[in-house]
Amino acid sequence: MKNKAVLFDLDGVLVDTAKYHYLAWQKLAKELGISFTEADNERLKGVSRDKSLEILLSLGEKTFSEKEKARMATQKNEDYIQYIYHMDETAVLPGVLLLLKQLKIERIKIGLGSASKNARLILERTALEPFFDAIIDGNSVIHAKPNPEVFLKGAQELGVKNEDTVVFEDSEAGCQAGKQAGMYVVGIGEQKNLPSADLVVKDLDGFTINTIFG
């Protein structure tokens, strides 16, 4: 399976960090007097920090200066980092380790394509970093998903063609980014939430590479 590759999103695909994002955003929302629910948090999946802040502020119809918004985004990130410092291998989602090991055995290149600016810290805390041949995160790109930049850069760094790359995503924005990049997209979650995906599975538990490269 030479010259084949996969690009994984991080949050909600490889590790369970959604709850930490939710707690950090909820803390900020509470301080601002904005009601913020788990349903609201779903809208932030796969979205950059700055765009997520704009969505949160729109919920409360709040307006702030760029300087104030920068401070809020920094505060949210600091709160989030405090949560993820306590992460370990138990945060890795079911089926992930087995799939990563299988990909390594078959010599399929593995890359990360995530909007998270804390991706390397999370991979390090969960002992997943050694599996990756390329890491493209929020520090490496200008445009957020659904812009395909993160996946285009991932394929380029892995040295593979876009059409020989499979993307794993749990957000519709991420699925759209993968399709715009000309890649095959596996959605993690529910079909109704991921209409752009080529294939949708509940999670990676029991998932094998034969499903996509068979």
Image (tube, rainbow, N blue to C red):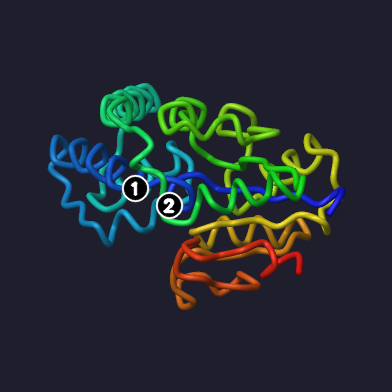
* Residue kind at label 2, given as amino acid type: Gly
**In the rendered image, the vertical position of residue 59 relative to residue 83, given as above or below:** below
Image coordinates for residue 86, horizontal then vertical, percent: 27, 28
Residue 169, numbered circle? none
For the residue pair 92 and 47, the one nearer the viewer reads as 92
User: What residue is shown with label 2?
Assistant: 12
For the residue pair 6 and 190, the one nearer the viewer reads as 6
Residue at (58, 43) in percent of width and height: 144
Image coordinates for residue 140, horizontal then vertical, percent: 64, 29
Q: Quadrant of the C terminus?
A: bottom right
| Mark 2 Cα-neighbour bin, 10 Å: few <14, some 14–19, many ≥20 | many
Q: Quadrant of the N terminus?
A: bottom right
Image coordinates for residue 177, horizontal then vertical, percent: 65, 55
Marks 2 and 1: CB-CB under 8 Å?
Answer: yes
How far apart marks 2 and 1 lie (CA) works out to 6 Å
Residue at (56, 65) in percent of width and height: 207
Q: Is residue 29 left or right of residue 52?
A: left
> Sequence-wise, which precedes: disc 2 or disc 1?
2
Please tell me in which quadrant of the rendered image residue 112 appears.
Answer: top right
| Mark 1 Cα-neighbour bin, 10 Å: few <14, some 14–19, many ≥20 | some
* Residue kind at label 1, given as amino acid type: Ala
User: What residue is shown with label 1?
Assistant: 18
